[in-house]
Image (cartoon, grey):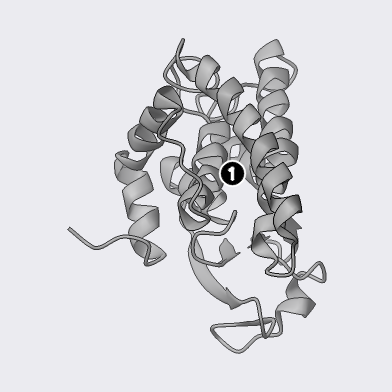
Amino acid sequence: MKLFYYPGACSLAPHIVAREADLSLTLERVDLANRTTETGANFAAINPKGYVPALGLPDGSVLTEVSALLQYLADSQQRTDLAPAHGTMERYRLLEWLGFISTEIHKGFGPFWNPATPDAVKTAAKERLVSRFAYLDGTLGKQSFLMGETFTVADAYLFTVMNWANFHQIDISPFKHLSAFQNRIASRPKVQAALEAEGLTKAA
């Protein structure tokens, strides 16, 4: 399989999950500005949506969208620790978290990526994010991970998008449980390997 990615983008989440699941994965960096990959391929032909992640599958097809990739990678190895079995209440709880992260956190950062966004809009967006951070902090004050005491694909996704707070100078230190979660995920060996592979941390 081949993961088309951009360093630190939401494609980091499936990258982490692939490593946690011990899957063999080839990485191909995408130049999002020029819509080309590091091998010179036209990324628009690979994913007409124009954004990462995109996962090239063994049969030659391409799968897109973070939530789909995360579940596909966990299910391909039948890793019920990373994603509970289909049809169980726990799986629906996982979907609940993936939906929350996608719509409330991932998309919540959207206004900050556009330099033309008015300050008033950014202020309102930050206030909404902070309220979501408070909710996450409350949850993580009771348990180590979003689903309890087991790391799942939802944690990889949350870790990835929460890292954007650093890029946009949004201080999450008041949320001590959420901050501790970020540090806890960052310390995982497979997460460190993914960060290093994307050039986001120095090699030891």
Q: Where the C terminus falls, by quadrant?
A: bottom left
- Dot 1 falls on a residue whose secondary structure is helix
Q: Nearer the viewer, residue 136 or 44?
A: 136
Residue 68 visible here? no
Pick the front one: 121 or 64? 121
Q: Determine the residue located farthest toward the bottom in the rendered image.
A: 40
Left or right, 16 with respect to 70, comes to: left
4 relative to 145, above or below = below
Q: Is residue 123 visible?
A: yes
Residue at the far right in the pictured view: 48
Res. 38 image quadrant: bottom right
* Residue named by callout 1: 73
Looking at the picture, does residue 92 appear above or below residue 170?
above
Instruction: Residue at 76% x, 52% y: name it.
Output: 121
Classify residue 55 by image quadrant.
Answer: bottom right
Residue 60's x, y, as percent? 71, 67
- Give how far across and how far down residue 27 sits, in percent: 50, 67
User: Could you tell me residue 100's position as x and y percent?
Assistant: 71, 31
On-image quarter of the N terminus:
bottom right
On the picture, is 175 further left or further right than 56? left
Which residue is more in the foreground, 167 or 156?
167
Mark 1 residue crowding within 10 angstroms, few (<14) / some (14–19) / many (20+) = many
Above or below, comparing residue 181 to residue 92 in the picture: below
As drawn, the residue found furthest toward the front would be 120
Picture coordinates of residue 75 (x, y %)? 62, 36
Quick one: 114 or 14, which is closer to the camera?
114
Q: Which residue type does callout 1 highlight?
A: Leu
Residue at x-position 31% and y-position 60%: 201
Q: Which residue appears at 60% of the width and 21% of the height?
A: 135
Vertical placement of residue 169 versus 128, above or below: below
